[in-house]
Amino acid sequence: MPATVALTVARYRPERESEPTFETYEIPFRKDWVVLDALNHVKDRLDGSLSYRWSCRMGVCGSCGMKVNGVPKLTCATFLSDYLPGPIRVEPLDYFPVVRDLVVDITDFVRKLKQVKPWIIREDGTSPPAGEYLQTPDQLDAYKQYSMCINCMLCYSACPIYGLEPSFIGPAAIAMAQRYNMDSRDQGAAERLKILSDHDGIWQCTFVGECTKVCPKHVDPAGAIQQYKLTGATHWMKSLLLPRSAR
Amino acid sequence: MSAGPHYTLYHPRWYRRRVSVWWWLQKRSYAAFVTREITSVFVAFFAVVTLWQLRALVQGPEAYERFLARLQTPLFLTLNVVALVFVLFHAITWFNLTPKAMVVRVSGKRLPDGLIIGLNYAAWLVLSAAVAFVLLRAA
Amino acid sequence: MARITPLLWLLFSAGGTVAALLFPVHMLLTGVAVPLGWLEAPRYEALHRLVTHPLTRIYLFVLISLPLFHWAHRFRYTLYDGLQLKHLTVLIAVLCYGAALGGTALAAYLLWNLR
């Protein structure tokens, strides 16, 4: 085990440069340190000007997403020991505008998330009802996987379609829509159908599958999208052949 | 909405990297993805060959013999072998991804992915055997 | 275009399934085994008789048409995303689906008029 390891970090200081640069820091190597620990060490001891986001440091808040050696990762869950002998390259997430250093602007994602209405929609518009909703374990199983999303945006950073077509609604938004569509308590599938079957909705996806690969919570957004394609296409056929029953 | 970003002291210039036209070569998984997509060209190739074979069959025995002879040329043999390799890649990736798109639930429980894939390969074997039987019987 | 996208995706899926399940055996026999002499080519009269059967006509129509639509849809997105030809998106769509329609029409014509 080496005593130190090199951390090459992308820096972007808009007040004095127009392009990102890289700076390398020599940080102590600890067997139990993750990349986030290394970044905190840099900020505490070496260069206090380094900007980055983090919060829970245990993989549930989704704040610390960055690229480590080119792969989108949660830096609180990425061990330095997996990257020996280094250097370890840390960059901001792809396909989002970089505000400063490792901080990206996530407005686009938040806007898209709101568009899919990620909440329980009831037909009569009231919620919650008198008393509690009843749901069997099998009904929970139908959407549980998609409810694990922590909105970390690693999937957006991995999706080449999002990079090429920034108006694409994206994997996490569709997975979140599916989480509610498949929830037995929800009655809003028809409301979400419009935005999802739009040109920039599910049909932009060509099933690259990278989103599922990088997802730290095993949500499988690619699967959610393909399943919704089938649902959307079936719904389209029904509305074509049986216009009244589709209402 | 303003026409463009208005940069101030507290809203400095953001940096956007342009996606390279060679994006699909930058990662092995992207290259594998594009290879999978390119298989569609070889699918179209064989659909056209089948159409050509049908047309030759309609035109008569001499046209059909000419078609068979054409397939024996080194050019078409090579094309057909290459196309077969790509179509096999298409078939394998297609079967392996089917359970992602089609979730089959039996009495509330989702059928395991391996079962769906296995059923696909079984169907592949059965259909291939049936086609081979019908075609070879005509020999 | 967004309104018929579900149909195009369904054709793409059906075509991909047909190509995956049936093309390998057909390609092996027609493209490799027979030309190389591993197997004897079907005799013209027997093949002609087989093709005139109504079920075979339907089978061949499906075998030719659906994979062409599979190619059209997939190739259109490959050009759009892979080569970033966004400004040509309408032209690409017209050429791809047009070619698939052309092949389908020709197959239908040949199979309908086959005696």
Image (cartoon, grey):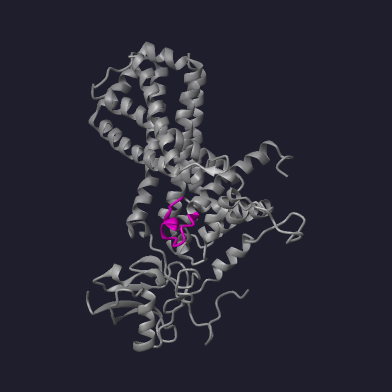
x and y, in percent, of residue A157 in the image: 44, 64
Q: Residue at x 30, y 67 (%)?
A: A82
Q: Is residue A215 magenta?
A: yes
Foreground residue among B80 and A208? A208
Q: Quadrant of the C terminus of chain A?
A: top right
Q: Quadrant of the N terminus of chain A?
A: bottom left
Q: Residue at x 40, y 71 (%)?
A: A75
The answer to which image quadrant residue C19 occupies is top left
x and y, in percent, of residue A131 in the image: 74, 59
Q: Is residue C33 above or below residue B18?
A: above
* B24 left or right, relative to C92: left
Question: How many callouts does the rendering have?
Answer: 0
Question: Is residue B47 visible in this depiction of the protein?
Answer: no
Q: Is residue A141 magenta?
A: no
Foreground residue among B75 and A78? A78
The answer to which image quadrant residue B59 occupies is top left
Question: Is residue A228 visible in this depiction of the protein?
Answer: yes
Q: Is residue A85 above or below residue C102?
A: below
Q: Is residue B14 above or below residue A247?
A: below
Q: Residue at x 56, y 48 (%)?
A: A228
Q: Main secondary structure of the magenta part?
A: loop
* B49 left or right, relative to C73: left
Q: Residue at x 28, y 28 (%)?
A: C32
Foreground residue among A38 and C83? A38
The answer to which image quadrant residue B135 occupies is top left
- Report the magenta residues as a range: A207-221
Q: Is residue A141 above or below residue B106?
A: below
Foreground residue among A58 and A99? A58
x and y, in percent, of residue A76 in the image: 41, 72
x and y, in percent, of residue A23 in the image: 32, 81
* A23 left or right, relative to A237: left
